[in-house]
Image (cartoon, rainbow, N blue to C red):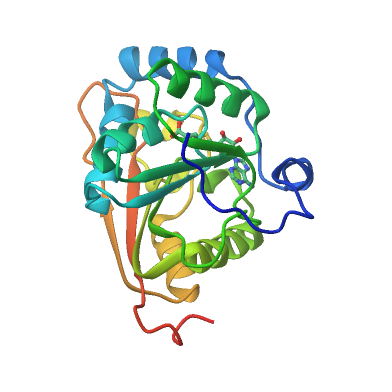
Amino acid sequence: MHSFAHHRPSRSGEASAKETKGLILNRGWRYDLMVWFIDTFLFRGQLRELRQRTANLAGIQPGEKVLDVGCGTGTLAIEVQSRVGRAGRVAGVDPGTQQIARARSKAARRTLPIDFQIGVIEHLAFPDQTFDVVLSTLMMHHLPDSLKRQGLSEIARVLKPGGRLVIADFKRKKERQGQAARFRAGGSGIQELAALVKDAGFSPVETEEMRLLRFSAFPGAGFVRAHKSSDEFAIC
Ligand SMILES: C[S@@+](CC[C@H](N)C(=O)[O-])C[C@H]1O[C@@H](n2cnc3c(N)ncnc32)[C@H](O)[C@@H]1O
């Protein structure tokens, strides 16, 4: 298995994961079953579409190094591995031990060399400028704002100059409409998220919304796509 060089050996991902103020999910295969059920019968495949679109927006190329932050059970990372090919590298980080165990077993079954680690967005155990792309789906609404800021500056640190960041998240309740407004998932304000990304030194920062299908309970989601400046001195 390929693995990335790690740093901060004195503070393990497991130790940081125990202290996070983020809302940890730890359901392993039950999470996958629940997501499959909800996506198939309530969301009409829109979660699957959200992941595909996240990878598409990042414009992932063969040979690139990609990190999925808050990777859960690894579904997006596995999709991304097929895009970067054997010359590329994919890593995924999540504090949920059962999520990571499930992600590792899914990758092992497919003999994919993905580096899944127990860890948190606020202390990414990778050296500066490791990745071409960082992705995150449906994770930001699990974090308080202070942690979002800390996490975004960690993402800026591990991205190479000119690297891309794509975040997908549910819309906040008051941004939703109709039946979706009654769905209970928490959400971020996509524009507020974009402002935090900008504050972390990314530019340009763009946003997009997912179209809502009729007869779907999907709560609505948006994307933030941003670039880390290729001027090394712009983000410090
Ligand atoms: C709704 S799940 C989304 C998982 C996956 N990205 C997906 O699209 O299926 C949110 C994930 O964020 C993780 N999480 C919570 N706090 C975190 C933190 N501080 N750093 C990284 N991930 C965190 C949870 O453990 C959970 O697996």
How many numbered marks, from 0 up?
A: 0
Q: Quadrant of residue 97?
A: top right
Where residue 77 sits: x, y (%)? 40, 36
**Which residue is nearer to you in this view: 112 or 106?**
112
Ligand 1's image quarter is top right
Where residue 56 sits: x, y (%)? 22, 45
Against 27, residue 174 (above or below) is below
From the viewer's perspective, is 208 left or right of 3?
A: left
Against 195, residue 96 (above or below) is above
Q: Look at the image and tell me whether residue 212 can be seen.
A: yes
Where residue 207 sits: x, y (%)? 29, 59
Q: Residue at x 24, y 35 (%)?
A: 212
User: Which quadrant holds the C terminus?
Assistant: bottom right
Q: Spot the residue most to the bottom.
A: 233
**Which residue is nearer to you in this view: 96 or 37?**
96
Against 5, residue 34 (above or below) is above
Q: Residue at x 73, y 54 (%)?
A: 9
Q: Look at the image and tell me whether residue 170 can be seen.
A: no
Q: Quadrant of residue 44?
A: top left
Q: Residue at x 33, y 33 (%)?
A: 178
